[in-house]
Image: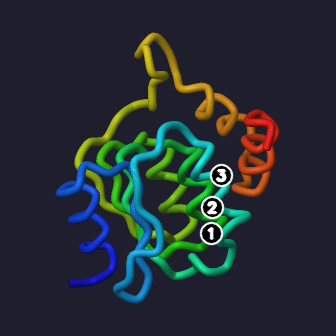
């Protein structure tokens, strides 16, 4: 089983929100809400996650930006927005998904996710990351 298959299996079977696997070993996994923990992975893990695979329950452009910045090899998304898929593809990152969505919505499903709104303003993953970090006061 390759890293992406391990990620996908663990995400689904254990009802997790995020799983990183590198060289057949789970590096990060858990049930996280929002973007805070994902943004913090950049500072906590940096280059350690390069060439890893990741499975995330919901991937919008904000999350895709973090994955690009971390230089992951592949992404599985339970749900992915069209713009996130395009962003991953532009950055030569292989991805799979269960459901393609127009946009990632906020928790109340009354509008677009605030993290997505931030990501729409910037074209580089680093700019998205820096502005998410600022928004989250990290």
Which sits in the foreground, 4 or 80? 4
Q: Residue furthest bottom?
A: 23
Q: Which residue is mark 3?
A: 39
Image height of 32 relative to 67, above or below: above
Looking at the rendering, which quadrant does residue 7 occupy?
bottom left
Disc 3 and disc 2: Cα gap in Å?
A: 5 Å
Quarter placement of the N terminus: bottom left
Q: Which residue is mark 1?
A: 70
Do the residues under discs 3 and 2 have CB atoms within 8 angstroms? yes
Q: Position of residue 117 (x, y in %)?
A: 64, 28
Nearer the N terminus, badge 1 or badge 2?
Answer: 2
The chosen color scheme is rainbow
Q: Position of residue 110 (x, y in %)?
A: 45, 10
Do the residues under discs 1 and 2 have CB atoms within 8 angstroms? yes
| 10 with respect to 103 (left or right) | left
Q: Which mark is residue 41?
A: 2
Image point 73% across, 64% down: which residue? 43
Disc 1 and disc 3: Cα gap in Å?
A: 10 Å
Q: Residue furthest top?
A: 110
């Amino acid at each position: 089983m390759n890293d992406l298959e391990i990620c996908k299996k663990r995400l689904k079977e254990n009802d997790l929100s995020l799983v990183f696997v590198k060289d057949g070993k789970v590096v990060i996994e858990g049930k996280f809400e929002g973007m805070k923990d994902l943004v913090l992975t950049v500072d906590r893990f940096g280059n350690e996650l390069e060439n890893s695979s990741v499975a995330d329950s919901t991937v919008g452009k904000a999350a895709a930006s973090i994955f690009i910045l971390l230089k992951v090899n592949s992404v599985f998304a339970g749900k992915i927005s069209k713009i996130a898929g395009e962003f991953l593809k532009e950055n030569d990152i292989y991805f799979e998904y269960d459901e393609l969505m127009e946009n990632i919505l906020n928790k109340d499903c009354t509008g677009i996710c605030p993290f997505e709104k931030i990501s729409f303003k910037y074209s580089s993953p680093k700019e998205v990351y820096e502005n998410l970090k600022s928004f989250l006061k990290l």
